[in-house]
């Protein structure tokens, strides 16, 4: 097809400048001799042209009869290469085919287009190699730009074998000592995790290294998770630029060293050095993962003080950070102020509302998202289904799941099934949840069975729960949460010997429990507590404060509920075990250091246990403080003795979350190692606050509450706590 014919296949709006152009449009009158010069037409291109600019200029060349001009086509191809990957592959291939006797400049630009094309993610390397072979056959020379473009194509796959062949070709061509080529090979080998080869090229000619060489080897080690080597290289660098700092910070954060990444960012700012968007998005992500609001606000103030443009990526990162740090008001504010929000921005806000338990608001935002003409993705529906699960919107959850499949053609993945099973399990529809799992189009994973096991435990389906629990500890013998759930099922059935056997099996298999910890940020510093922690420098004062808190709460009617502790130890020791949970230590420390009027913000890695939740609610009532807890499942905004979760996850509908299957992992303390062999059932403590005097009355009360929840409260649009 001719170029004229190809151009006509594009939308006319791309060829005809319907909108007012930023630069004057050249007259197409062939009578003006000065305009018949191709360089004059090409000069109309703006400094940063778009695909529309490129096609308009090409159309003028066609109209003026200059489309066959060799230099003009080569220049258009160069612009096309700069636009990749947005330029259609058929277009730039046709451009190159129209060039008479293409030189190395045109050939390299086509290679660049092929390397960056997104028309077929698997094709770039093969297409580039095929074209490179053609260059050899036709005698078109190569230069030091040829190999970097070829390697860029290879790194998309990545294909280490073909890259090694290119290395041999570079040696044959005498280009292996060229610094530009050497840096390209360091970068390529690093992208393939072939660090030995990358380091060999880096070390061969130390006198020829430049800043690009150092950044390339630094990125290779960081990408492979070798942050220790990256750190050493970073310290040895003779000079650093924003890419060096960005690579090191991203290396820390992507490999889980979040605090080190944030520390390096502070050092960067203290030195007064320049930052880029990649650094800012990365450190915002680190703050979000750790739940560090003070640091997140510091990053936000840095963005504003530097007058950094609030791009969609940066705005979305801020929305995510504030939502995950428990400051939903600022998250919403930034979201509402953002210009040009994309699907990722909307998904982030929907998921943020869901995590904070605002299911109805998340669903409302989803409908606004649809009304704006956006097409939901799989992540969108994960957020919406999760919102329905948090708010107990059973009918809505079923409807959105059906909408996802039938209207938008999205095949359900494990996360979608998990949200729906969680929703049904919370609502007591365990049989329907079982039917859903049995009818899945993909094999259910252990997490899904774990959710169902949690539902069985809550709703007293002991036999089914035991069968699922046995299956789970065989599927994932290293997951401690499943042992806890199975032991809980046996305890519910009063099979105490089986409870002990599960604990012994866990010990014999060498299954290590996940250490529970709580983080609290105070005055720019991060404080970490673990269950029974005595290492903190202020522990004596923290312990004294905790004793004072417990005394005040007991006066208000609090009695620890230790019924969930399955160890065969006496009542007093059980009270001591639960008193030393990490969030209680963090709360005591928060009362010491956080000013009155400001919320105490705590981040946990595990799901908060029921008694700690009750403890935290009472603290807010007795001490008139606000506490915000982000656990492994959701946010808990506690104030005036109430929680934003409405006790939904601890009452009749309590169930394990999609992400954290354990129920009371922190209860598996060091006492597990010395578990007694007796099979006496543990005592069941009763919370005096609710003035419940017997199990029979408890059952009647729960049944009555269930009837109210399932008949009257749905008419009010939300579920209320049983208290």
Image (spheres, rainbow, N blue to C red):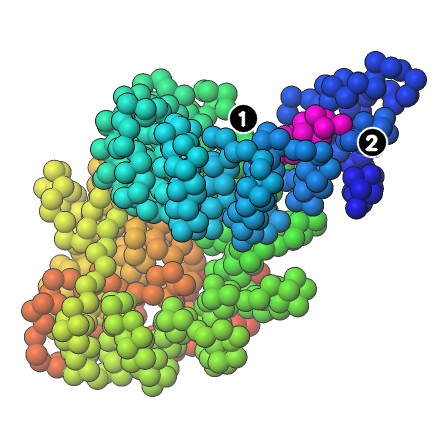
| Residue 349: x %, y % from top left | 53, 46
Who's the residue at 23% across and 83% down the image? 494
Who's the residue at 16% across and 83% down the image? 497
Give the mark toward the camera: 2 or 1: 2
Report, in whole angstroms, how far the alpha carbon at label 2 lies from the one at label 1: 39 Å
Q: Residues within 10 Å of mark 1 (few under 14, many from 20)?
A: few
| Residue 85: x %, y % from top left | 60, 40
Q: Which residues are magenta?
A: 69-83
Residue 492 appears in the rendering: no
Q: Residues within 10 Å of mark 2 (few under 14, many from 20)?
A: some
| Residue 356: x %, y % from top left | 45, 51
Work out whether residue 690 or residue 234 is closer to the camera in this orientation and state it.
Answer: 234
Q: Quadrant of residue 378?
A: bottom right
**Residue 79 forms part of the magenta stretch:** yes
478 relative to 236, above or below? below
**Residue 334 forms part of the magenta stretch:** no
Q: How many marks?
A: 2
Query: In the image as oriented, which residue stretches furthest toward the right?
Result: 31
The residue pinned by badge 1 equals 309
Q: Earlier in the sequence, mark 2 or mark 1?
A: 2
The residue pinned by badge 2 equals 62
Q: Main secondary structure of the magenta part?
A: helix
Q: Quadrant of the C terminus?
A: bottom left
| Residue 473: x %, y % from top left | 27, 75
Who's the residue at 27% across and 67% down the image? 479
For mark 2, give the secondary structure.
Answer: helix
Who's the residue at 47% across and 37% down the image? 147
For mark 1, give the secondary structure.
Answer: loop
């Amino acid at each position: 097809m001719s170029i004229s014919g190809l151009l006509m296949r594009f939308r006319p709006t791309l060829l005809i400048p319907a909108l007012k152009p930023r630069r004057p449009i050249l007259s197409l009158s062939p009578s003006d001799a000065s305009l018949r010069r191709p360089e004059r037409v090409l000069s109309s291109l703006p400094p940063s042209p778009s695909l529309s600019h490129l096609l308009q200029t090409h159309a003028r060349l066609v109209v003026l009869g200059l489309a066959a001009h060799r230099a003009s086509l080569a220049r258009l191809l160069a612009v096309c290469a700069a636009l990749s990957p947005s330029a259609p592959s058929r277009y730039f291939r046709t451009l190159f085919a129209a060039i008479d006797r293409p030189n190395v400049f045109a050939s390299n630009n086509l290679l660049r287009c092929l390397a960056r094309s997104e028309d077929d993610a698997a094709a770039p390397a093969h297409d580039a190699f095929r074209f490179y072979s053609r260059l050899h056959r036709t005698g078109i020379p190569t230069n030091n730009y040829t190999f970097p473009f070829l390697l860029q194509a290879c790194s998309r796959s990545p294909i280490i074998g073909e890259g090694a062949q290119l290395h041999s070709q570079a040696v044959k061509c005498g280009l292996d000592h060229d610094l530009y080529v050497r840096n390209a090979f360091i970068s390529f080998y690093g992208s393939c995790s072939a660090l030995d080869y990358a380091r060999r090229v880096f070390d061969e000619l130390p006198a020829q290294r430049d800043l690009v060489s150092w950044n390339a080897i630094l990125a290779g080690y960081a990408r492979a998770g070798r942050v220790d080597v990256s750190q050493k290289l970073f310290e040895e660098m003779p000079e650093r630029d924003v890419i060096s700092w960005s690579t090191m910070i991203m290396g820390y954060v992507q490999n889980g060293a979040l605090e080190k990444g944030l520390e390096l960012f502070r050092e960067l700012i203290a030195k007064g050095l320049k930052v880029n968007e990649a650094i800012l998005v990365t450190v915002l992500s680190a703050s979000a993962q750790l739940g560090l609001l003070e640091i997140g606000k510091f990053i936000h103030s840095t963005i504003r003080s530097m007058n950094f443009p609030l791009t969609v990526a940066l705005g979305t990162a801020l929305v995510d950070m504030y939502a995950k740090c428990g400051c939903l008001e600022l998250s919403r504010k930034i979201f509402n102020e953002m210009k040009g929000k994309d699907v990722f921005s909307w998904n982030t806000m929907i998921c943020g509302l869901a995590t904070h338990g605002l299911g109805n608001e998340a669903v409302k935002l989803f409908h606004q998202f649809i009304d704006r003409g956006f097409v939901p993705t799989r992540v969108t529906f994960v957020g919406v289904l999760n919102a329905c699960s948090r708010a107990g919107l059973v009918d809505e959850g079923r409807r959105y799941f059906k909408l996802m499949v039938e209207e938008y053609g999205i095949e359900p993945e494990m996360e979608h099934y998990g949200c729906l099973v969680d929703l049904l399990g919370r609502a007591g529809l365990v049989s329907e949840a079982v039917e859903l799992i049995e009818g899945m189009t993909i094999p259910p994973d252990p997490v899904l069975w774990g959710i169902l096991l949690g539902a069985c435990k809550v709703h007293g389906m002991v036999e089914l729960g035991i069968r699922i629990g046995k299956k789970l500890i065989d599927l994932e013998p290293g997951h401690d949460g499943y042992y806890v759930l199975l032991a809980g099922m046996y305890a519910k059935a009063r099979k105490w010997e089986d409870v002990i056997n599960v604990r012994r099996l866990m010990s014999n298999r060498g299954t290590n429990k996940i250490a529970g910890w709580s983080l609290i940020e105070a005055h720019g510093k991060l404080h970490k507590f673990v269950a029974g922690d005595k290492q903190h420098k202020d522990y004596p004062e923290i312990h004294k404060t905790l004793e004072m808190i417990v005394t005040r709460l007991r006066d208000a009617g609090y009695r620890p509920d230790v019924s969930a502790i399955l160890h065969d130890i006496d009542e007093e020791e059980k009270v001591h075990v639960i008193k030393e949970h990490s969030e209680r230590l963090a709360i005591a420390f928060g009362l010491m250091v956080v000013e009155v009027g400001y919320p105490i913000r705590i981040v946990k890695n595990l799901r908060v246990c029921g008694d700690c939740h009750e403890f935290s609610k009472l603290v807010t009532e007795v001490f008139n403080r606000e506490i915000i807890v982000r656990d492994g499942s959701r946010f808990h905004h506690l104030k005036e003795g109430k929680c934003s979760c409405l006790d939904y996850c601890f009452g009749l509908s309590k169930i394990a979350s999609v992400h954290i299957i354990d129920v009371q992992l922190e209860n598996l303390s060091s006492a597990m190692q010395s578990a007694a062999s007796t099979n006496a059932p543990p005592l069941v403590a009763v919370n005096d606050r609710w003035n419940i005097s017997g199990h029979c009355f408890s059952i009647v009360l729960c049944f009555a509450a269930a009837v109210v929840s399932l008949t009257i409260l749905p008419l009010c649009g939300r579920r209320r706590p049983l208290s």
